[in-house]
């Protein structure tokens, strides 16, 4: 099981808390993707791509984990009482963040190999079908 493999404590409690979501009916044409296995396979192919790298990049795009994973207030009154109303980044802001990330990690000089970047992106695209699982 994914949770056990990741060392999550109290797996039974977690499953019980999420039972409704885990047992909800999904559309017949929907697929389930084991993102944990997908990431493990992908990271095995690329030196330096691991969970620590993702954890270091995540806040740059999505904000602090606590904010991203926080349960949203139910209505605007609750949001106001929480002290702020938050809007998602505008597309321009996200593009700026993405360009900055790409430049810093794949910019000019020794770290830039556009052929390697393109090959890695293509490998990720090609791998997607192997991570799909059909409901039964």
Image: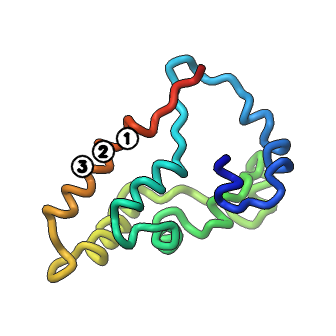
Task: Determine the secondary structure under disc 2.
Answer: helix
* Secondary structure type for disc 1: helix
Image position of 128 (left or right of 109): right
The C terminus: image quadrant:
top right
Q: Which residue is mark 1?
A: 128
Which residue position holds label 3? Answer: 122
Image spot of residue 17 (x, y percent): 83, 45
| Snapshot quadrant of residue 95 | bottom left
- Do callouts 3 and 1 mark residues in contact (Cβ within 8 Å)? no
Residue drawn at x 18%, y 74% is 112
- Residue 33 in picture, x, y percent from top left: 51, 39
Calculate the distance from the C-alpha at mark 2 to the C-alpha at mark 1: 6 Å
Asked if the residue under mark 1 is in contact with the one under mark 2, i.e. CB atoms within 8 Å, the reply is yes
Pointer 3: residues within 10 angstroms few (<14), some, or many (20+)? few
Marks 2 and 3, how far apart at CA: 5 Å
Residue 28 versus residue 111 in the image, above or below: above
Query: From the viewer's perspective, is residue 11 above or below residue 30?
Result: below
Q: State the count of labels.
A: 3
Front position in the image: 24 or 135: 135
Mark 2 — residue?
125
């Amino acid at each position: 099981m994914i949770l056990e493999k990741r060392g999550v404590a109290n797996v039974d409690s977690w499953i019980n808390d999420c039972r409704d979501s885990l047992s909800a009916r999904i559309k017949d044409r929907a697929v389930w993707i084991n993102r944990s296995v997908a990431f493990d396979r992908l990271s095995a192919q690329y030196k330096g791509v691991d969970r620590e790298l993702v954890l270091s990049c995540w806040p740059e795009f999505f904000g602090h984990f606590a904010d991203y994973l926080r349960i949203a207030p139910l209505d605007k009154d609750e949001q106001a009482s929480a002290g702020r109303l938050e809007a998602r980044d505008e597309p321009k802001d996200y593009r700026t963040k993405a360009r900055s990330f790409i430049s810093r990690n794949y910019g000019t000089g020794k770290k830039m190999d556009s052929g390697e970047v393109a090959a890695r992106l293509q490998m990720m695209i090609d791998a997607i079908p192997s991570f799909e699982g059909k409901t039964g």
